[in-house]
Amino acid sequence: MRKVNSVILREISDLIMKIVDFKSGIFVTISKVDTTSDLRYTRIFVRVFPQSEIDYSMKTLEHERIAIQKVLHKRLHLKVLPKISFVHDKTGDDVDELEKLLHE
Protein backbone atom coordinates (compact mmCIF):
# COMPACT_ATOMS: atom_id res chain seq x y z
CA MET A 1 0.00 0.00 0.00
CA ARG A 2 2.92 2.35 0.62
CA LYS A 3 4.00 2.07 -2.99
CA VAL A 4 0.44 2.64 -4.28
CA ASN A 5 0.09 5.71 -2.04
CA SER A 6 3.47 7.00 -3.19
CA VAL A 7 2.58 6.65 -6.88
CA ILE A 8 -0.82 8.30 -6.36
CA LEU A 9 0.78 11.17 -4.41
CA ARG A 10 3.28 11.82 -7.20
CA GLU A 11 0.65 11.64 -9.94
CA ILE A 12 -1.92 13.77 -8.09
CA SER A 13 0.70 16.43 -7.33
CA ASP A 14 1.57 16.60 -11.02
CA LEU A 15 -2.08 16.69 -12.10
CA ILE A 16 -2.99 19.47 -9.69
CA MET A 17 -0.20 21.63 -11.11
CA LYS A 18 -1.33 20.94 -14.70
CA ILE A 19 -5.13 20.85 -14.43
CA VAL A 20 -6.23 23.05 -11.53
CA ASP A 21 -6.07 26.82 -12.00
CA PHE A 22 -5.94 28.48 -8.58
CA LYS A 23 -5.91 32.22 -7.99
CA SER A 24 -2.51 33.84 -7.95
CA GLY A 25 -0.65 33.50 -4.66
CA ILE A 26 -2.26 30.23 -3.55
CA PHE A 27 -0.01 27.26 -2.90
CA VAL A 28 -1.51 23.79 -2.56
CA THR A 29 0.56 20.79 -1.54
CA ILE A 30 -0.32 17.16 -1.04
CA SER A 31 0.83 16.07 2.41
CA LYS A 32 -0.45 12.50 2.49
CA VAL A 33 -2.37 9.91 0.49
CA ASP A 34 -4.39 7.22 2.22
CA THR A 35 -5.80 4.44 0.04
CA THR A 36 -8.07 1.72 1.37
CA SER A 37 -6.74 -1.84 1.20
CA ASP A 38 -9.35 -2.80 -1.42
CA LEU A 39 -8.15 0.15 -3.61
CA ARG A 40 -11.66 1.54 -3.93
CA TYR A 41 -11.12 4.89 -2.19
CA THR A 42 -8.23 7.29 -1.83
CA ARG A 43 -8.17 10.28 0.50
CA ILE A 44 -5.81 13.04 -0.61
CA PHE A 45 -4.71 15.24 2.30
CA VAL A 46 -4.11 18.80 1.15
CA ARG A 47 -2.34 21.77 2.77
CA VAL A 48 -3.14 25.29 1.56
CA PHE A 49 -1.20 28.52 1.95
CA PRO A 50 -2.45 31.09 2.83
CA GLN A 51 -4.89 29.55 5.26
CA SER A 52 -7.48 32.20 4.43
CA GLU A 53 -7.92 30.51 1.01
CA ILE A 54 -8.72 27.02 2.33
CA ASP A 55 -12.43 27.14 1.47
CA TYR A 56 -11.79 28.46 -2.04
CA SER A 57 -9.04 25.90 -2.68
CA MET A 58 -11.06 22.94 -1.43
CA LYS A 59 -14.06 23.98 -3.54
CA THR A 60 -11.82 24.34 -6.59
CA LEU A 61 -10.30 20.90 -6.03
CA GLU A 62 -13.72 19.35 -5.58
CA HIS A 63 -14.90 21.04 -8.79
CA GLU A 64 -11.92 19.56 -10.69
CA ARG A 65 -12.01 16.19 -8.91
CA ILE A 66 -13.65 14.26 -11.76
CA ALA A 67 -11.22 15.62 -14.37
CA ILE A 68 -8.26 14.77 -12.10
CA GLN A 69 -9.66 11.33 -11.42
CA LYS A 70 -10.12 10.56 -15.14
CA VAL A 71 -6.53 11.46 -15.98
CA LEU A 72 -5.26 9.60 -12.90
CA HIS A 73 -7.10 6.47 -13.99
CA LYS A 74 -5.46 6.65 -17.43
CA ARG A 75 -2.00 6.94 -15.83
CA LEU A 76 -2.39 4.20 -13.22
CA HIS A 77 -2.25 0.58 -14.18
CA LEU A 78 -4.37 -0.88 -11.41
CA LYS A 79 -7.12 -3.46 -11.69
CA VAL A 80 -9.37 -1.42 -9.38
CA LEU A 81 -9.21 2.35 -9.80
CA PRO A 82 -9.81 4.30 -6.58
CA LYS A 83 -12.34 7.08 -6.19
CA ILE A 84 -10.51 10.12 -4.88
CA SER A 85 -11.61 12.65 -2.30
CA PHE A 86 -9.76 15.72 -1.06
CA VAL A 87 -9.40 16.37 2.67
CA HIS A 88 -7.94 19.48 4.28
CA ASP A 89 -4.89 18.44 6.31
CA LYS A 90 -5.26 20.28 9.60
CA THR A 91 -2.13 18.90 11.28
CA GLY A 92 0.01 21.69 9.83
CA ASP A 93 -2.47 24.29 11.06
CA ASP A 94 -2.08 22.99 14.61
CA VAL A 95 1.70 23.17 14.35
CA ASP A 96 1.55 26.72 12.97
CA GLU A 97 -0.79 27.80 15.77
CA LEU A 98 1.42 26.21 18.44
CA GLU A 99 4.53 27.82 16.95
CA LYS A 100 2.78 31.20 16.94
CA LEU A 101 1.78 30.80 20.59
CA LEU A 102 5.29 29.76 21.61
CA HIS A 103 6.76 32.72 19.74
CA GLU A 104 4.46 35.14 21.60
Image (spheres, rainbow, N blue to C red):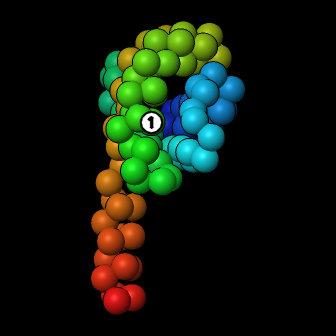
The residue to which callout 1 is attached is 57
Which residue is at 35% across, 38% downward?
Answer: 55
**Res 10 → quadrant:** top right
The quadrant the C terminus occupies is bottom left
Whether residue 85 is situated above or below residue 93 in the rendered picture: above
Whether residue 3 is situated above or below residue 93 in the rendered picture: above
Which residue is at 57% across, 36% downward?
Answer: 23
Horizontal side of residue 11 vs 58, given as left or right: right
The quadrant the N terminus occupies is top left
Would residue 27 be seen by someone viewing this image from the given angle?
A: yes
Q: Position of residue 81 (x, y in %)?
A: 46, 14
Which residue is at 60% across, 13% downward?
Answer: 71
Q: Residues within 10 Å of mark 1 (few under 14, many from 20)?
A: many
**Res 22 → quadrant:** top right
Would residue 31 be seen by someone viewing this image from the given angle?
A: no
Secondary element under disc 1, as helix, strand or loop, is helix
Q: Position of residue 77 (x, y in %)?
A: 60, 15
